[in-house]
Image: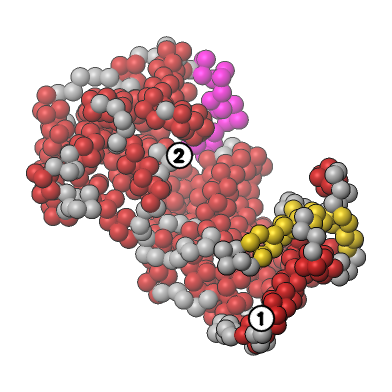
Amino acid sequence: MNSKKVMIVYRKELMEVLRDKRTLFTTLLLPVILYPLLIVGFNAIMARQTGVLEKKSASVAVQDSVMNPVSMAIIEKLAEVENYTILPAAGNAQSLYENKDIQAIVSISDSLTASGLTTYQVYIQYDTANEQSMTVYSRLKDKLAESKNDLLHEQLELRGVHTDVMEILDVRPIDTASSQRKMGMILGMFLPYIMIIMLLTGASVVAADLVAGEKERKTLETLMVSGVGRLEIVIGKYLTIITLAMLNLVVNLFSISFSMRYMLSQAGMDMSGASLPLKSIFILLAAMLPLATLFSAILLSLSTFSRNMKEARTYEQPLMMVSMIMAMISFLPAIEMSNLMALIPVINIALLFKAVMIEEYQISHLLITIGSTLILDVFAIWATIKLFKTESILFRSDDDSGGVKAIKKNKASFFSPYNGIVYFSIALLLLYYLGSYWQTQDLWQGLLKTQIIIIALPVLLIIRMLKLKSRDVLRLKAPKLLPAALIPFIAIPGAILVAILAQIINAIYPFPEQYLENLTRLFNMDIPTWQSFLIVAVAPGICEELLFRGLFPRFFEKFGVKFSIIITALLFAAFHLDPFRFVPVFLLGLLLGYLTLRSGSIYLSMFSHALNNGLALFFTAFATQPWIKVLISDSDNLHYWVALPAAIVFGIAMYIFHKTTGEKPCVE
């Protein structure tokens, strides 16, 4: 790679982008102007509307079933609320309330305690979905608190007890949080979400134009025939996207941080002594840079793959939605940064943002976040370079759509990555909505319906409709004897290693109790053991393998065997809708994909999958037996020492399997 040529491309692309006045305005000037205007205007409107609600008149109906001096005193206290009209509740009070002619109904009743003391209950009927009704409730509640205090003083005086006894315990808070930490807490809650979205948005605007836009304008060919190599072109465009993304991020970050201090002070928080946390912001910019490089690489790949800007925008939407959802973790309480969380892209930045803003971060978390993101970045830019060097992708024609007409002309065109993702999305939706409904109604029947109707049946229908040979497409070929004999020595130790990995994840990041209960319920259905084995082990072993090791690899095999195994394993893990077991299931998917594509027979992965699930069922069924305590501890977890012999057996079996199935993976 020629760094001089890279910089030529970089300067050329940067100058073209910055020459656009609209880009300069939206990237540099708009955030500086927009945030102060929005925040000042928002605060002014909020203050005005709050005042309007406070001053707005309201009618309150009171139903007094006690009718004594105490209840009368309570009603008189309520009548003190300014602009409120207190009316006796008539028979049509409920209909008036429903028609919003009155805003609340107060009911007063009494009861006698075991000690002979008369107590009073006041019920306030109000609408939590109506802002005025909420305000009415709040003001009535405050007046009733005053009334309660008056009644207590009265009762104490009647009994000859000095009213100072009410102050026997005086709780007074001592807030040790500085104004700086308060500001950091607020910023750390919602600023990560805004910044991640701003970063992605800033990068996407540039990325879509740099390749897909050039394809549309027919200028990419001119660049390709220049003296600059493709690698230099990719890196130059890549640096341009990173520069504009970080520029957009920096301007937005400083603008909103400055404006936030004003907003918090207007909200009544003491901001004296609080200043813009510049040190924290610089640390976060250092952490955001790897995320910027990751987003830039992914978006450049999408732009390279797309035929035009419209298609690029379409591909960007899923990335935007997933990033938005992951960034929202900063809003959730009690979720803190950990070594495990530091490995998850986007989530790690959001949580690190919170920790840095309140000055409770650890250097190890910062380094893991940066390191793990950079590793993903390497893979993403490698994919971009590979796409840019693939002529069939870089110069796809507009009619290369893989639509219905193209499939009719060429049935093999059905097996494209786009169709694979669409198929997976539909299957996932059916699993989530229809499959979960069936399993809620009846667990074992729902599981069986899900496997057969949602997972396996569509595969067979597609093969039949396209008139393809199922034996070749799905690799329904009899395996050789020795590889088949090795499967138990691969599947069982592999399942043990994966189970121990899940235990380690649970120890680092404990699974919720409800999740563990649901998982246990799956292996403790009130049916015979042989029936559980068929539903939990055999059915998934056949049906899921037909989809994930039979049909799905065909959609991605144009990118090579390794990529096909990895992407199908990722889809396999995502399809289980289980974030706590995502990594173990992904590793299992890698193993099953390797067994199928290496041997050319799907029957081996079916056998291995069934053994994996069957082993879990076996341990659950015999967990109480004394003889199995050698392997299982009291907490129903495998002893960690079991991992060593399992790893040895697994390694030897995999070595023999690899040698006996030939040097080249079997992919037709």
Q: Nearer the viewer, residue 212 or 54?
A: 54
Q: Is residue 11 visible?
A: no
Q: Is residue 159 placed above or below 302 in the rendered structure?
A: below
Q: Is residue 279 visible?
A: yes
Residue at the spot 44% in from the left edge and 16% down from the top edge: 461
Q: Is residue 252 placed above or below 405 in the rendered structure?
A: below
Mark 1 and mark 2 in contact? Answer it, CB < 8 Å.
no
Q: Position of residue 434 (x, y in %)?
A: 50, 28
Q: Which residue bears the numbered disc 1?
A: 159
Left or right: residue 77 compared with residue 556: right
Q: Is residue 403 magenta?
A: yes
Q: Residues within 10 Å of mark 2 (few under 14, many from 20)?
A: few
- Mark 1, secondary structure of its residue: loop
Question: Mark 1, mark 2: which one is toward the viewer?
Answer: 1
Way the structure is coloured: secondary structure
* Label disc, if present, on residue 390 of the rendered structure: 2
Q: Nearer the viewer, residue 331 or 403?
A: 331
Which span is picked out in magenta? 391-409
Q: Position of residue 94 (x, y in %)?
A: 81, 45
Q: Amino acid at mark 1?
A: Arg
